[in-house]
C-alpha cells in the first residue's frame, strides 16, 4: 500500500489540505501524512474554513515537524514550498502560501491543490470512484 508524505514549511495549510484530499480520495487504498519543516503552532483558520466548505474537517489537526522517519517510510514525498526541499522529495509542487490570505484566495489555492492531488491519486491508482467530486461552495 503506497504511503505519501506531504511537506510544506508550516504544515498549517498546503500540506494539510493535500493530506485531507488524498485521504478522502484513496481511503483504504493508500496512507498519507503531512508535516512541516518549521511547523506553526496551529492550522490557519481560513484553511480550516475552506476545507469545511467541501465537507473535509481539519478540526483537531495539529502541525507536525518533519522527521527522517516520516521520509524513510514514504513512497512519495511531496514538497510544497518547503525550504530546504526534503532530501527524499520525489515531487515539488509550487503553490502559493495560504497563510494570512482571504478566503477567496485560499479557495483558489485549495482547488489547485485538489486538482494536483487528483492526478497523484490517479497516477498511484488509488482513487476511489466518486471521491474527487467534492463540490466547491463559494
Image (cartoon, rainbow, N blue to C red):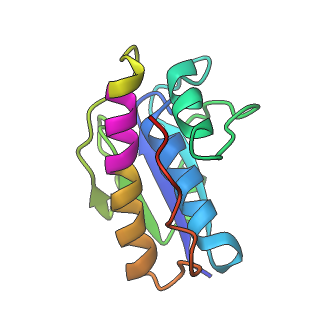
Depicted 84 relative to depicted 22: above or below: above
For the stretch drawn in magenta, the main secondary structure is helix
Quadrant where the C terminus sits is: top left
> x%, y% of residue 72?
53, 62
Q: Residue at x 54, y 81 (%)?
A: 126
Looking at the image, residue 35 sits to the left or right of residue 59; the answer is left
Foreground residue among 72 and 42: 42
Residue at the (26%, 33%) spot, across then down: 96
Task: Give the tally of numbered discs.
Answer: 0
Residue 114 in percent (x, y) is at 41, 54
Q: Is residue 40 magenta?
A: no
Give the residue at x 58% y 28%. Answer: 49
**Residue for point 41% across, 67% down:** 118
User: Residue 82 versus residue 29: which sits nearer the camera?
Assistant: 29
In percent of width and height, residue 102 lies at 38, 17
Residue positioned most to the left: 94
Residue 98 in sight in this render: no
The part of the image, by quadrant, that contains residue 120 is bottom left
Examine the rendered structure and indicate whether residue 26 appears above or below residue 92: below
Quarter in which the N terminus is drawn: bottom right
State whether residue 24 appears in this view.
Answer: yes
Q: In the orientation shown, which residue stands out farthest toward the right?
A: 60
Q: In the image, 20: left or right of 122?
A: right
Left or right of residue 124, residue 92 in this image: left
- Report the magenta residues as a range: 105-112
Q: Which residue of the protein is positioned furthest toward the front in this rendering?
A: 138
**Residue 57: x, y in percent?**
69, 40
Q: Is residue 108 magenta?
A: yes
Amino acid at each position: 500500500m503506497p504511503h505519501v508524505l506531504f511537506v510544506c514549511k508550516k504544515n498549517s495549510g498546503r500540506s494539510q489540505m493535500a493530506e485531507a484530499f488524498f485521504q478522502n480520495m484513496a481511503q483504504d487504498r493508500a496512507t498519507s501524512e503531512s508535516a512541516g519543516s518549521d511547523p506553526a503552532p496551529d492550522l490557519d483558520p481560513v484553511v480550516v474554513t475552506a476545507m469545511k466548505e467541501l465537507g473535509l474537517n481539519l478540526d483537531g489537526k495539529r502541525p507536525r515537524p518533519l522527521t527522517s522517519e516520516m521520509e524513510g517510510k514514504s513512497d512519495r514525498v511531496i514538497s510544497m514550498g518547503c525550504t530546504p526541499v526534503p532530501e527524499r522529495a520525489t515531487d515539488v509542487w509550487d503553490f502559493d502560501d495560504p497563510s494570512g490570505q482571504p478566503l477567496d484566495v485560499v479557495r483558489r489555492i485549495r482547488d489547485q491543490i485538489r486538482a494536483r492531488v487528483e492526478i497523484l491519486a490517479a497516477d498511484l491508482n488509488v482513487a476511489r470512484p466518486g471521491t474527487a467530486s467534492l463540490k466547491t461552495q463559494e
